[in-house]
Amino acid sequence: MTPLIEAAGLVKTFAVRGAARGARLHAVDALSLAVAPGEAVGLTGESGCGKSTLARLLARLIDLDAGALSLEGVPIETMSIGRFAVSPQRRLIQMVFQDPTESLNPRFTAFEAIADPVRALLRPKSRAEVETRVHAVADQVGLGRELLARSPRQLSQGQKARVGIARAMVVEPKLLILDEPTSSLDASGQATVLRLLARLRREADVALLFVSHDLNVVRLLCDRVMVMHLGEIVESGPARAVLAAPRHPYTRALVSAVPRIGGGDAEGRALDGEPGSAIDPDPNACRFRSRCPNARELCAREAPPLRALGQGREARCHFPLEG
């Protein structure tokens, strides 16, 4: 099966103010991935590991420095952001942002916010066609039509989250990239949005790339998980298998830090040592070695590749943990 979206060797760096001349922060570094049609993939890791930058690269909201990116087998990395924004391929990838309040134009009603991508990407022939699409997607996401005339300040956080999802779904995308879409919601709102996303995936056959630091959400919603650390994927595989028995020490630390009802085993929760830096990291060393309890001499002189471990699992470690 041709991947829906495929990236090979993606690189994105940023200049660092106040640092040594020419210093660069390696937000995404030689990263490769693929998402299949209809698949739900979780992308997780600590804040600052590069998750949101990667999401914006895949959505073609920012330019990459190097690498290849294809959509349904067609290369799109050389297309400028402006040209891609008006191309027929734009509607195939839509993004739902972390803060529904900040991502909605305060001057637009909910109807206009949802209608805007219809007019920009589908070129409807009449207002009636726009209304039909907006009403249909409002019903699809459970947004009452009486709310469509309201401005964002007249909507609750949960309602604004639905507007953001409706705005993405109205052009019938094949991939939804969701950047922490439930982080601003309470527990009830989170559960509602997660159920909605699972239903949309099932009914509309849309693939999901779900960016989240909440491992419980990733476990529930996603088929596969990719764990990111300092611009690199350090572990990937079936979500339940990876989160039940991590093979990379960094993943184990993330999993063991998840709060449990009644407490439980906290082994591995604290990591000793200074965190590594994404500013001009040593290309010949493991980026996790300064905090890794299993680090050895080899880790300081040879960067580990992302290697296959069997059963669809990979880990970037010279000495992967036992399954």
Image: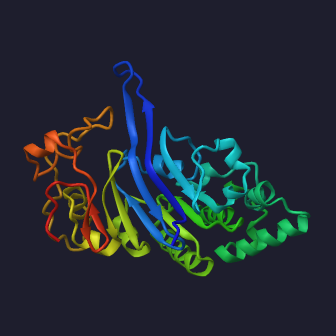
Q: Residue at x 44, y 52 (%)?
A: 8
Relative side of 267 to 182, left or right: left
Colouring mode (rainbow / by chain / secondary structure / one colour): rainbow
Position in image of residue 16 (x %, y %): 40, 27
Farthest residue in the top direction?
Answer: 21
* Figure quadrant of residue 206: bottom right
Relative side of 313 to 67, left or right: left
Q: Residue at x 13, y 68 (%)?
A: 322
Q: Residue at x 34, y 20 (%)?
A: 20
User: Along the line of sight, which residue is nearer the eye, 205 or 215?
Assistant: 205
User: Along the line of sight, which residue is nearer the eye, 128 or 125?
Assistant: 125
Does residue 109 appear in this view? no
Farthest residue in the left direction?
Answer: 297
User: In the rendered view, would you say 27 is above or below 252?
Assistant: above
Does residue 102 appear in this view? yes
* Figure quadrant of residue 41: bottom left
Position in image of residue 126 (x %, y %): 91, 64
* Figure quadrant of residue 202: bottom right
Position in image of residue 176 (x %, y %): 57, 63
Position in image of residue 39 (x %, y %): 49, 72
Q: Residue at x 24, y 40 (%)?
A: 276
User: Along the line of sight, which residue is nearer the eye, 235 or 292?
Assistant: 235
Relative side of 45 to 152, left or right: left
Q: Quadrant of the C terminus?
A: bottom left
Q: How many marks?
A: 0
